[in-house]
């Protein structure tokens, strides 16, 4: 199943931790809808702008998986509203370029530069995006 032209559900729910620990990481229909909105409004515009494949290091996390990876208790990953992208894997653009493109061009809820652009966290809600820009050092 595809969430958008260039993002599959398999990519969006894949987690080595879930596989290793036998954690079910299947989204609910509501979470799946949120994931499709992130794919269409965040992932695809980034991919279209840079015209390069993007590596999704984390998207959906079930509550059990989020606990296993010690994620925030309020993580938007658990709602299917967040995506972590690491462009350094394929090298078509940089994480900093993605961060700046999203900040300057897209509607988003939170945009986080994680540890000097080690990856970029972007969340999106259908309504009420806050456009928060955060840097985690």
Image (spheres, grey):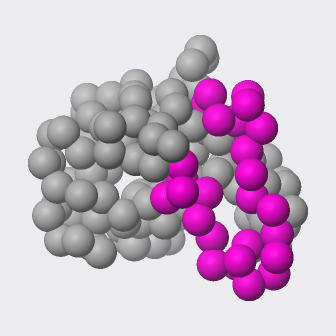
Query: Which portion, as a residue range, is magenta?
Result: 9-34
Query: Would you say 110 lies left or right of 116 here?
Result: right
Q: Is residue 109 visible?
A: no
Q: Does residue 119 lie above or below 135 as drawn?
A: below
Q: Is residue 22 magenta?
A: yes
Q: Is residue 40 visible?
A: yes
Q: Residue at x 13, y 48 (%)?
A: 51
Which of the 4 image quadrants contains residue 62? bottom right
- Image x and y of residue 115, in percent: 46, 72
Give whichever of 30, 77 is nearer the camera.
Answer: 30
Q: Residue at x 84, y 55 (%)?
A: 63
Seen from this angle, which residue lies furthest bottom? 20
Q: Is residue 128 magenta?
A: no
Seen from this angle, which residue lies furthest front? 1
Q: Does residue 12 lie above or below 117 as drawn?
A: above
Give whichever of 64, 6 is nearer the camera.
Answer: 6
Query: Would you say 20 lies left or right of 44 here?
Result: right
Give whichever of 109, 47 is nearer the camera.
Answer: 47
Q: Residue at x 33, y 29 (%)?
A: 106
Which of the 4 image quadrants contains residue 68? bottom right
- Image x and y of residue 28, in percent: 77, 38
Q: Does residue 75 lie above or below 79 as drawn?
A: below
């Amino acid at each position: 199943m595809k969430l958008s032209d260039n993002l599959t559900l398999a990519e969006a729910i894949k987690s080595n931790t879930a596989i290793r620990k036998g954690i079910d990481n299947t989204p609910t229909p509501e979470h799946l809808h949120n994931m499709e909105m992130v794919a269409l409004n965040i992932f695809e515009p980034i991919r279209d702008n840079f015209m390069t494949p993007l590596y999704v290091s984390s998207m959906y996390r079930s509550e059990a998986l989020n606990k296993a990876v010690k994620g925030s208790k309020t993580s938007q990953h658990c709602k299917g509203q967040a995506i972590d992208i690491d462009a350094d894997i394929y090298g078509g653009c940089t994480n900093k370029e993605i961060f700046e493109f999203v900040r300057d061009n897209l509607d988003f809820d939170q945009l986080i530069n994680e540890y000097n652009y080690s990856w970029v966290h972007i969340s999106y809600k259908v309504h009420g995006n806050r456009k928060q820009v955060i840097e985690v050092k």
